[in-house]
Amino acid sequence: MSILLQISDPHFGTEQPPVVAALLELARQLKPEVIALSGDITQRARRGQFAAAADFVAQLPPSRLLAIPGNHDIPMFNLAARAFTPYANFQRVFGADLEPLHDSEHMLVIGVNTTRPQRRKDGEVSKEQIESVAARLRTARPQQLRIVMIHQPVHVIRTQDLENVLHGHRIAVPAWAAAGADLIMGGHIHLPYVRPLEEHFADLPRRVWAVQAGTAVSSRVRHEAPNSVNVVRHKAAQAACEVERWDFHAPSREFRCVEMQALELDRLRTITRRDA
């Protein structure tokens, strides 16, 4: 079984030490193949905040780490840095590649940088990025779970979050679905949920799921959503995928699994029809 741990929106600079400690313990217990940091790693993209993030990362188990920036990882008040070196502090910790890739026997994870320095918080995906991700998805092997990791969501469940939807999503989602995506994973709005994208895209050629994460360790939680992370488990032999939501439980100072969804993957449905 392949395991991915999604950590989103930790906002170092607003982190809560007991929650950080509990998350590190969970990661050590899970020993995931991949740890996916889906943006807003810091609160204001300051060196000290990235140093705290680096200290956290150094304590994680030896998994493949994929990190993409969020809008908070670009300087807001240092206008010169925002204009000329917007990703400098991020890249000191996580390396030059803003769109990392993980390609293993059972899992393909494609990171996409949806931030734009000229925007305050909105995300965007370009035509070139859409085509590049689709081309990479088309090379996936049949047994791989295919995940696209972005920061801003492509599907929201509350009208007040519509302003946060990724610019370009109407073109990206059908293109990535046609190319074979299974999950489109994001954060940004601090609200965890899993939804089939056919809710908003009626003519998708295959089933694709939106997997949204809450804020992992920050005090900037929504009143209805505590600190949380997602755990994705993929059983290639059964063509199955499970997404678990793990919430921080303050009295015990640990993360606990509070929800599990077994997701139907299209290649499972195709195999069933062929064998029928």
Image (tube, helix red, strand yellow):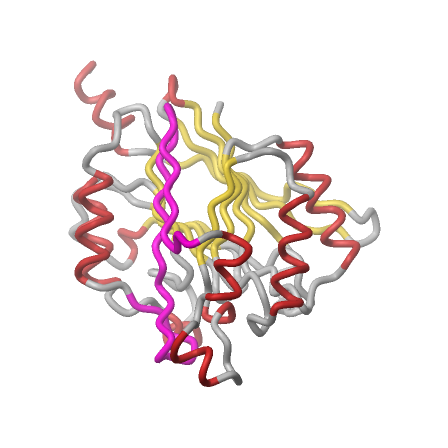
Quadrant where the C terminus is found in the figure: top left
Q: Is residue 22 left or right of residue 30?
A: right
Name the spot of residue 81 as percent of width and height, x first.
Answer: 46, 78
Front-lying residue, 33 or 74: 74
Tell whether position 109 is magenta: yes
Q: Residue at x 56, y 58 (%)?
A: 214
Q: Is residue 167 left or right of residue 14?
A: left
Q: Residue at x 35, y 49 (%)?
A: 184
Q: Is residue 208 above or below residue 81?
A: above
Q: Is residue 167 above or below residue 134?
A: below
Residue, far right: 251
Name the spot of residue 174 as percent of width and height, x first.
Answer: 19, 52
Name the spot of residue 142 as percent of width and height, x first.
Answer: 26, 25
Q: Main secondary structure of the magenta part?
A: loop
- Residue 108 placement: quadrant: top left
Name the spot of residue 104 as percent of width and height, x first.
Answer: 38, 28
Total number of numbered labels?
Answer: 0
Tell whether position 47 is magenta: no
Q: Which residues are magenta?
A: 96-124
Front-lying residue, 58 or 259: 58
- Residue 85 placement: quadrant: bottom left
Q: Residue at x 39, y 62 (%)?
A: 153
Q: Residue at x 70, y 51 (%)?
A: 248
Q: Is residue 127 above or below residue 183?
A: below
